[in-house]
Image (cartoon, rainbow, N blue to C red):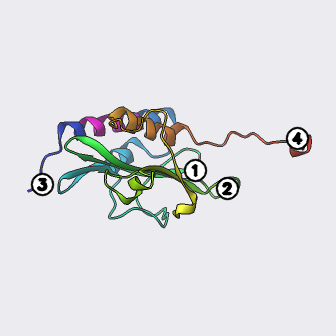
């Protein structure tokens, strides 16, 4: 018999669903509300609870055929958030950009590894991948809303989701290289 989700996992799931519903309502997401409601789930894997887009494993092949949220501009993303004893201990938020976006990386992933992960000893528990899964492009970051040593909150997770929903978009700006002096 599966255990019931913790109150913390339920509250976080509700906050994520509310933010996703708002994005659907205002047109930031091409994913419909009905699709969105079916995409987000809470799963249990032993001592941990994971709020995620249903998947058997991470989508490292960036297969658009796997479940995901689609933005109205053609970008698409998924995420997973791991809680232990009601506290967020890890996450992975990955966005993939349309092939028509020729400039910049094809995707970006924000990872927060669980405590004790090998990356923690290397100062990379919280890191960003820009178009490469290799360490050569793994960039340490501390998001402005998460301080080192501080507990990660539901608000932090919603802020990461918001970055994928409304941030990281093409600006339409074109630099005039000829006008730049050397």
Up-down relation of residue 86 to residue 60 (above or below): above
Q: Earlier in the sequence, mark 4 or mark 2?
A: 2
Residue denoted by label 3 = 2
Over which residues does the magenta segment extend? 11-20
- Which mark's residue is nearer the viewer, 4 or 1? 4
Relative side of 26 to 156, left or right: right
- Which mark's residue is nearer the viewer, 3 or 1? 3
The answer to which of 28 and 91 lies nearer the viewer is 91
Q: CA distance from mark 3 to mark 1?
A: 37 Å
Q: Residue furthest front?
A: 121
Q: Quadrant of residue 59?
A: bottom left
Q: Earlier in the sequence, mark 3 or mark 1?
A: 3
Residue denoted by label 2 = 100
Q: CA distance from mark 4 to mark 1?
A: 32 Å
Coordinates of residue 144 in the picture (x, y in percent):
49, 33
Q: Which mark is residue 74?
A: 1
Relative side of 45 to 115, left or right: left
Coordinates of residue 40 in the picture (x, y in percent):
32, 48
Coordinates of residue 2 in the picture (x, y in percent):
12, 54
Residue denoted by label 4 = 180
């Amino acid at each position: 018999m599966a255990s019931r989700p913790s109150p913390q996992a339920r509250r976080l799931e509700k906050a994520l669903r509310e933010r996703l519903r708002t994005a659907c309502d205002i047109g930031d997401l091409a994913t419909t509300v009905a699709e969105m409601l079916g995409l987000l789930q809470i799963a249990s894997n032993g001592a941990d609870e994971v709020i995620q887009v249903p998947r058997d494993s991470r989508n490292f092949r960036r297969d658009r055929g796997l479940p995901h949220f689609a933005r109205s501009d053609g970008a698409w993303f998924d995420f997973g958030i791991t809680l232990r004893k009601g506290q967020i201990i890890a996450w992975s938020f990955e966005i993939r950009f349309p092939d028509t976006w020729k400039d910049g990386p094809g995707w970006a992933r924000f990872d927060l590894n669980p405590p004790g992960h090998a990356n923690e000893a290397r100062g990379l528990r919280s890191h960003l991948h820009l178009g490469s899964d290799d360490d050569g492009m793994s960039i340490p970051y501390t998001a402005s809303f998460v301080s080192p040593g501080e507990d990660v909150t539901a608000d932090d997770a919603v802020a990461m989701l918001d970055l994928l929903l409304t941030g990281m978009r093409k600006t339409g700006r074109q630099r005039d290289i000829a006008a730049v002096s050397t």
